[in-house]
Image: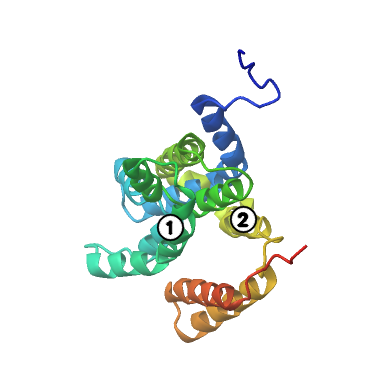
Amino acid sequence: MIALPDLAASPEPSPWHEARAGAVAILPATVAVVPFALLLGALAAEKGLSPLEVALMSGLVFAGGSQFVALDLWTTPAAWVTLGSAALLVNLRHILMGASIAPKMAGFHPIARVLALLLLADEIWAMAERRAAARPLTPAFYAGLGGLLYVNWVVFTTAGAVVGARLGDPAAYGFDFAFTAIFIGLIAGFRHTRGFLPTIAVAGVAAVGARMLLPGPVSIAVGAAAGVAVAALLPTRRETAP
């Protein structure tokens, strides 16, 4: 007897379909970071960086928070040890994000997994976690997430460096709130997960407290560590017997 194909089964989505789905998922965040990227480029130009240097910084670092901190500490000549230490403190949260998302990359080739983690950013991590909670995370979907945001970031930070002072006062356009708004949106996307409120509350209090005692990027690491500690201490949800 010839087995008939299961017409009810949905076909496996193609890599192109998955990449497009990833790009669509990250598109709102991509648009939201445009003013943030323009502002970063303009500030970098004020510090004396050329558009090419801004493009290289965005392409190699690809971490808005640490780039802003580096520019805030930028001097001529540059204090490389201070800049590197500050960037490390700000980006310590990437270790936690990487540890969270790596187990969801079972279908990734080892080289693809390394490249994906190099491309990791807050928005990409949040969208990838959301996808992994519903369906398996695929390399093509992740490439759609990371590729669009990466290109967008490099292009618009460079554009900000070209435009420079012609942007005027960024606060007049609300650009200074763009970074905060993005993170509020990302955090709100996890509001239905277990332990959301206590984790966010403790992380926020710890970060603010650290900021008051030790002004600087160390507050980011402290807040992240406090949030992880609370999440680890929360009781795991157990299935009840039928």
The answer to whether residue 104 is above or below residue 78 is above
Q: Nearer the viewer, mark 2 or mark 1?
A: 1
The answer to whether residue 1 is above or below residue 95 is above
Seen from the viewer's position, the closer of residues 98 and 222 is 98
Residue drawn at the location 48% of the way across and 75% of the way down: 225
Within-10-Å neighbours for mark 1: few <14, some 14–19, many 20+: some
Q: Position of residue 210 (x, y in %)?
A: 50, 82
Residue 79 visible somewhere in the drawing = no
Residue drawn at the location 59% of the way across and 45% of the way down: 131
Seen from the viewer's position, the closer of residues 131 and 23 is 131
Q: Which mark is residue 82?
A: none
Locate residue 241: give its quadrant: bottom right
Q: Position of residue 88 (x, y in %)?
A: 34, 66
**Marks 2 and 1 in Cβ contact (< 8 Å):** no
Seen from the viewer's position, the closer of residues 143 and 87 is 143
Tell me the residue that label 1 is attached to. 98
Total labels drawn: 2
Q: Residue furthest right?
A: 242
Q: Which mark is residue 186?
A: 2
CA gap, disc 2 and disc 1: 17 Å
Locate residue 203: give its quadrant: bottom right
- The amino acid marked with disc number 2 is Leu
In the picture, measured across the screen, residue 159 lies left or right of residue 136, that is left
In the picture, measured across the screen, residue 12 lies left or right of residue 90, that is right
Within-10-Å neighbours for mark 2: few <14, some 14–19, many 20+: some
Residue drawn at the location 44% of the way across and 61% of the way down: 99
Q: Position of residue 111 (x, y in %)?
A: 31, 42
Q: Secondary structure at mark 1?
A: helix
- The amino acid marked with disc number 1 is Gly
